[in-house]
Amino acid sequence: MRNDYDELETYNHDNNDYNEYNGQTTMTYDDLNRLISSKVRGSMIWMVIGLLITGGIGFMVYNGVNNGNSIAYMIIEKYWIFLILEVVAVLAFSALVYTANSSVLKLIFLIYSALSGLTFSVIGLRYAPDMIGSAFLGTLSIFVVLAVYGYFTRENLTRFVPLLTAGIIAMILVSVVNMFLGNSAIDLFVSVLGVVVFTIYIAVDVNRIRNNIIACAVHEDSDILNKIEIVGALELYLDFVNLFLSILRILGRGRD
């Protein structure tokens, strides 16, 4: 069965100026590799920018609360408003993927990252700084390993998406049920499942960015490629944040 990596065969391995395939001119093999590397790196950079915005704003609110800032207290008390706005931002991003240009999507991503910082500020009030640091380092280590694997593997990892989606749905449903039960064992199960699901998702999403670049490179449409880059950044951002939260919940439970 033909997969996305078979698309590599449409490119000129001899690195001539162009190569004919099914009546279309294509870029060279080295050009394609440079493009893939550039766009995957771009997704990573945008993800890091989003995380820095989230972490920076979250720290400012946390620090404001410790210093008795009234605005910071208001943000903590009304964090659910910003949580709703986060959902709206993600829905807007998804709705505009095919119609808006990449600049609009980048702006929405930055807004979403800022809103996440406002809502995540409560984490600093619930967990000790060393616990947050440990969860972050653990998440970063897992992310690097799985991102490297997702980039270099020649397998098409997107076949795991239906299974991972089922895992997320199961997490949501079990979490809703446990809101009424308050069972700590179920909460641990959800957290562990979250670690497994979002760890695998990191490799899958990096792999998917690479595959999408390969599939679209022949058109050489810069805005489409830029959209793939920023969509990938949001996916990786969500993978990182959700993995971090799952690990943090496990560590927090261990110290209760």
Image (cartoon, helix red, strand yellow):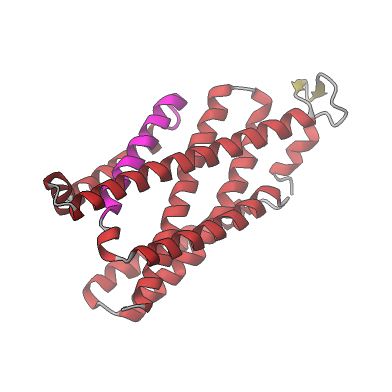
Per the picture, the main secondary structure of the magenta-coloured stretch is: helix
The percent position of residue 60, horizontal first and vertical second, equals 27, 46
Residue 240 seen: yes
Residue 78 drawn above or below residue 43: below
Q: Residue at x 52, y 41 (%)?
A: 232
Above-or-below relation of 46 to 124: above
Residue at (19%, 47%) from the top-left corner? Answer: 81
Q: Residue at x 28, y 41 (%)?
A: 88
What x and y, as percent, mark residue 248?
A: 39, 66
Q: Relative to residue 52, is residue 130 depicted above or below?
A: below
Vertical comparison of 29 with 73: above or below: above
Q: Nearer the viewer, residue 148 or 159?
A: 148
Q: Which residues make up the magenta segment?
A: 97-121
Closer-to-camera residue (7/117): 117
- Look at 78% across and 25% down and name the residue there: 22
Query: Any magenta on residue 99?
Result: yes
Residue 170 visible in image:
no
Q: Position of residue 163 (x, y in %)?
A: 52, 61
Q: Position of residue 123 (x, y in %)?
A: 29, 59
- In the image, taking residue 118 as reference, residue 237 lies left or right, namely right
The residue most toward the front is 67
- Quadrant, the C terminus: bottom left
- Seen as rendered, the residue at the extreme right is 14
